[in-house]
Image (cartoon, coloured by chain):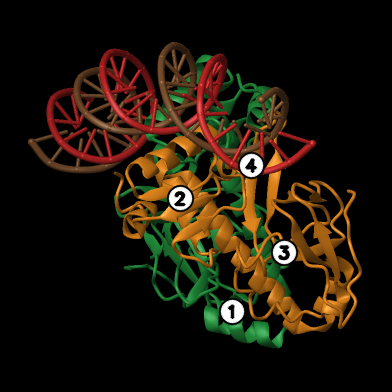
Chain colours: A green, B orange, C brown, D red
Amino acid sequence: MLTSYATFRPYAAPAFHTDSTPALWRRLAPAELQDWPRSLGTIRLFTQDQEVYCERDEAQSFFKVVSGVVRTYKVFYDGRRYIDGFLVAGDIFGIEFSGERSLSAEAVCDCTVISYCRQQLDISAREDVGVTRQLFTHAMRGLARAQEHALLLGRKSALEKVVAFLLEWAEHSTNKDVIVLAMPRQDIADYLGFTIETVSRILSSLDRDSIIGLLSARQIRVMRPEILRAIGTGCVTD
Amino acid sequence: MLTSYATFRPYAAPAFHTDSTPALWRRLAPAELQDWPRSLGTIRLFTQDQEVYCERDEAQSFFKVVSGVVRTYKVFYDGRRYIDGFLVAGDIFGIEFSGERSLSAEAVCDCTVISYCRQQLDISAREDVGVTRQLFTHAMRGLARAQEHALLLGRKSALEKVVAFLLEWAEHSTNKDVIVLAMPRQDIADYLGFTIETVSRILSSLDRDSIIGLLSARQIRVMRPEILRAIGTGCVTD
DNA sequence: CGTCAGCTTGAAAATGCTCAATGGAAGTGG
DNA sequence: CCACTTCCATTGAGCATTTTCAAGCTGACG
């Protein structure tokens, strides 16, 4: 809750966290959304693992990632955690249909986000059809992503899941040869629905087979992209 | 593709399939959507396992279930099938963001659906802000459902999954004591992401423990609703 | 009464999990 | 600069769960 923030001043470069998280994890912003009035938003900085909002909180605002990575998640009674998704630069998150947060959100690494007022959006949506249409587009995008995630979790072996995850992240890497992971193993495990040991073992076995090269825990060299793609799309089980 | 259909005639009771599938599997229709001009739609009947549309087809229409149950699914190269969801009376399905079907749809049992023209919707949405807003509501509902499904698949043991599924279907049963399943075991398995044997074994074990009573393959008496609920919500692992 | 499709059950095999130990890199303080 | 701590990742061994393969059961229907 102790969120460090800075009001956005026009014509002054805001103190982005771009130094610590460089040009990595870029995603093209949906063209329609990137031009929302910035003056309506407030730039906020979050440090690693800092909470953005918590499940069941009142949803008074929503966000857009400027730099860094944010995770949305849910924790069960027994302590198990389910990670719904990772948000990167350009992604919108925290738009709730009901009044309260259905998930919690945290900074995976140091992040910069713009916070918008929900009420302002409601008003804009009522006045401007374009805004409503943009929201619809956003919702459909989110829907597609959720379906993809369910599909990933539903069928597919541990190997297929990990590879699919790697391919998903390869998309965000500027350098196509080396995937730079923003998150620890625990996050990957909670996203894919198993334990860190399994993630680790599968990465190790891919490394042993020279399909990938584990440069460090967070840096993975893609040595055989064609094999990865074959496994990830479910064409090969081996 | 051999879909039997009948053009909707105002003031004439359409030949619903309500005889074969009575008042079961009802879901309250979203208030905003139930009043879409019926004259724009066409009543269509589908028999069990009949295709409504196929993945990658051009999406020229979308649908609302009047009676019966529809499943949306995806088939992999290796033959594995992933069932995205089951649609019951009042549910809208087949609205695509892109121009083509992301999933296939089939009748689980004999069904009656109303088919609407997509283009008509596009025009309505452009003219009427209300329609756009309704679409948004629908998309958000779908998003919530997809997230729930991903959450169900992600963590949770086979027992928890099956129980969660039963509770989900209990909602659709008019009689709260006896759950009437519309679909075969294979559908349940493909929805929950495992094999029919596992589904069968878990139902048998719940029956053995007198938590449920297997009246027949499709009829399940709920004997200990409180225990079911405890397992389904993840409070108990036993 | 036989057939057939869908469901159940059993035994063996595979997959992923738990528990426990080890390794390794970054940060801290002497 | 070097111990020391700490956090995260890896690895191994045994265990639990789920799958696979195969056989039997059941109810619907001709």
Q: Give the chain of mark 1.
A: A
Could you tell me which residue is drawn at 80 percent across and 77 percent down? B125
Is A119 drawn above or below residue A12 in the view shown? below
Q: Are marks 4 and 1 in contact (CB under 8 Å)?
A: no
Q: Nearer the viewer, mark 2 or mark 1?
A: 2
Q: Nearer the viewer, mark 3 or mark 2?
A: 3
Q: Give the chain of mark 4.
A: B
Residue type, mark 1 in image: Ser
Residue type, mark 4 in image: Tyr
Q: CA distance from mark 4 to mark 2?
A: 21 Å
Q: Is residue A237 left or right of residue A214?
A: right
Q: CA distance from mark 4 to mark 3?
A: 30 Å
Q: Is residue A182 left or right of residue A145?
A: left
Residue type, mark 2 in image: Ile
Position in image of residue B218 (x %, y %) = 55, 48
Residue type, mark 3 in image: Asp
Q: In this view of the protein, which residue sits in the foreground, A183 or B134? A: B134
Q: Give the chain of mark 3.
A: B
The residue at which mark 4 appears reads as B82
The residue at which mark 1 appears reads as A39
Which label number is shown at residue B19? 3
Tell me the quarter of the picture where residue A120 sits: bottom right
Could you tell me which residue is drawn at 71 percent across and 72 percent down? B135
Quadrant location of the C terminus of chain B?
top left
SS of the residue under disc 2: strand
SS of the residue under disc 4: strand
Q: Are marks 3 and 2 in contact (CB under 8 Å)?
A: no
